[in-house]
Amino acid sequence: MATLADLFDMQVCASILTSIRWEEGLRCPYCGSTDVYSHGNYEGSFSRYFCNRCHRTFNDKTETIFEHSKIPLT
C-alpha cells in the first residue's frame, strides 16, 4: 500500500493507476480486444500498447479523465 509520501512520486502514481485501470486484465479501450502487446512507454511513466485487432495504440491514461490533463497525477 502506498504511503502519502509515495503519492509525490510519479512512478508510484502511474503504477497505482495502471493496477486500477487494468484490474480485470489489459484490453483495448477502443475495440475491447485482449490481443494487445506492449509498445514502449508514454511520458516515461506509463506503458504504451498496440492492439492487433483494430491496429490502434493507447496508453494507461487513454479514455480516462487523465488522458489530456496537463495536471500530473502527483
Image (spheres, rainbow, N blue to C red):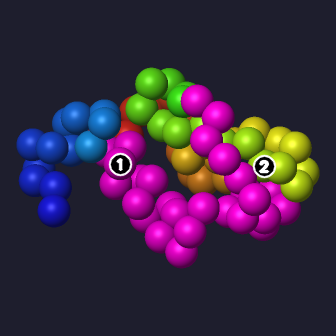
Q: Position of residue 4 (x, y in %)?
A: 11, 50
Q: Residue at x 41, y 60 (%)?
A: 19
Q: From where the camera sits, is residue 67 visible?
A: no
Residue type beneath disc 1: Ser
Q: Which residue is mark 1?
A: 15
Label 1 CA crowd tier, 10 Å (few <14, some 14–19, many 20+):
some
Taking 35 as reference, is 6 left or right? left
| Mark positioned earlier in the residue sequence (1 or 2) | 1
28 over 71 or under it: above or below: below
Magenta stretch: residue 17 in it?
Answer: yes
Taking 22 as reference, is 33 left or right? right
Q: Which residue is mark 2?
A: 51
Do tag 1 and tag 2 residues touch (Cβ < 8 Å)?
Answer: no
- The residue closer to the viewer here, 40 or 60, is 40
Residue type beneath disc 2: Cys
User: Label 1, label 2: how many angstroms apart (C-alpha)?
Assistant: 21 Å
Taking 70 as reference, is 7 left or right? left
